[in-house]
Image (tube, rainbow, N blue to C red):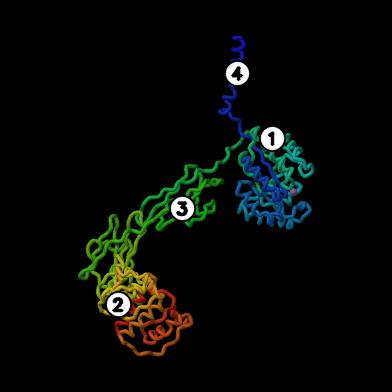
Amino acid sequence: MKRILSVLLVLVLTLSLPLCLAPQTQAATKLVAITFDDGPSGYTAGLLDGLKARGAKATFFVVGNRIGSYPETMRRLVREGHQIANHTTNHPQLTTLSASSIRQELNTCENKLKQYGGNQMYCLRPPYGSYNSTVRQQSNGPLILWSVDTLDWQSRNATAVYNKIINNTTDGSIVLLHDLYSTSVSGALRAIDTLKARGYEFVTVNELFRRRAITMQKGSVYSAAYNKGITLPAVEAPVAPSITVSDVLGGKTVSLTTTTKNAEIHYTTDGSKPSEKSKKYSGAFTVKQNTTIRAVAYNSVLSKESKKSITVPLAAAPTATYNEGKLTLTAAKGTTLYYTVGDGAPTTSSAVYSAPIAMQTACGVLVRAKGAADRKITYTLTKYGALFSDISHKAWYYNAVSEVVQKGIMVGTANQNFAPDQKVSRAMFITALYRMSGERAEVTPLEQFEDADMQSWYAEALSWGVEKEIVKGMSEHTFAPNDNITREQMCAFICRFLAYKQLSPECHEREPFADEKEISFWALQDVMALYEMELINGRDNAMFCPASQTTRAECAQVLVNLLTL
Ligand code: NI
């Protein structure tokens, strides 16, 4: 018994030895190119599912006049890594045609292939494997025949197809099939399972020749790439790029790297999907605004995508004060201030701020910091020396803003902003009118307006407006204090203000507004009266834009017009 056991033990050890060594002495992969002619067809999509499940690649010699009927199948072929190739446009026997007819047959198909596979050298399989020197001369690519003919079109029998493949395939074979028959598809997929188990890898024709270190030549004829001792490694998808972002003056620098040798990096900055056709990375670059980087590495195979959103803030604004003819700026930490006095645009070659700047009208400042986009600010003085960073002394409303700020009728919003384009709420407008009147009023309870907050900043002005019959509600019970005031509503307020003040400026005849019909019936009289009194003007092209909301600049101008009465 003991002896038997020891014999068994020796046997087990001997048997297991090659198994243990197997991973280290792995045999070179056997390659086979499986090819399908005459499609695409209704069976191709199912074939693609089967190939995908098995990790097998194939080559499809498609017929040009069928391509248009299967656009999604064509896209899938390319997307899933199969090779698309030329099988002429109408499947004629090319040897019976003239050179120019052959060229037309080949080029028409190739132009359709290009819509899916782009510019590349497309392999040709002449129908019936029939070619001559004219066909070879006219071809834009190599001619690919086969070494294993399954005769699938004849048998229409999956088992027969399977047996043909299994019994005839060797390392380097090119197998001929047609994706026109369900029997070809099922026979081929079964054969793939069997041959994979025997160590075969299913590759495209291009990959078969590349791995056998054969450079196919245009016009040459190939029917197999048998193993003569050279099998190059498969190209694996490169490692996806890593995206490194670092701070530089005026923005952020982006570096893209992949650990895969000889892989190119391609990227987009507009959010679009990157491919090998996207911009090629050639060195670190700087982004000056919020940007999404999407990048891939490519070495005939695309890597997975890397994506990074980069936020580039604006350099922090300094605090600014103006006193006795001098602008004093206090720079935020880590920022440098460059400036030019007057209307010139500052650059990083301009003077660097170090002490208060003597300033008469305007001063341009460029703020630069690491990791932030340059901020440009133009400080402008009103006629009376108030400092703003968002008005120009060349703006049409410059004088009006100067006046209303000087008289305290309107004030800046924050950080030297006047916000000329910002809209004016109904509460703000009655407040401005109230301030302009110079009158004082007590806050009175206003029961008619359910939405008026009589504890708020506008309570006094609103009480005054109601008492003087300048304000009417939006409806019987609402004032809508926070709604932006439209241009025609503003006219109605002003007309009632004029009535209260018993002012009736002289009227002048003026060209009618092109959009007079747009003015609400209740406002038409008021709008036209103010227009003829030259207290209000249209906007561009003789338009009044009655429903448009009033801007702070327009509000300032109207109030200044009233002040002149
Ligand atoms: Ni054919």
The percent position of residue 481, horizontal first and vertical second, equals 36, 71
Marks 4, 1: nearer the viewer: 4
The percent position of residue 36, horizontal first and vertical second, equals 70, 45
Mark 4 → mark 1, Cα distance in angstroms: 33 Å
The quadrant where residue 156 appears: top right
Q: Is residue 132 visible?
A: no
Q: Secondary structure at mark 3?
A: strand
What residue lies at 54% left-to-right and 45% top-to-bottom?
Answer: 299
Within-10-Å neighbours for mark 1: few <14, some 14–19, many 20+: some
Which residue is denoted by mark 4 in the rendering? 12
Question: Which mark is on residue 464?
Answer: 2
Marks 2, 1: nearer the viewer: 2
Mark 2 → mark 1, Cα distance in angstroms: 100 Å
Question: Which mark is on residue 170?
Answer: 1
Q: Secondary structure at mark 1?
A: loop
Which residue is denoted by mark 3 in the rendering? 293
Within-10-Å neighbours for mark 4: few <14, some 14–19, many 20+: few
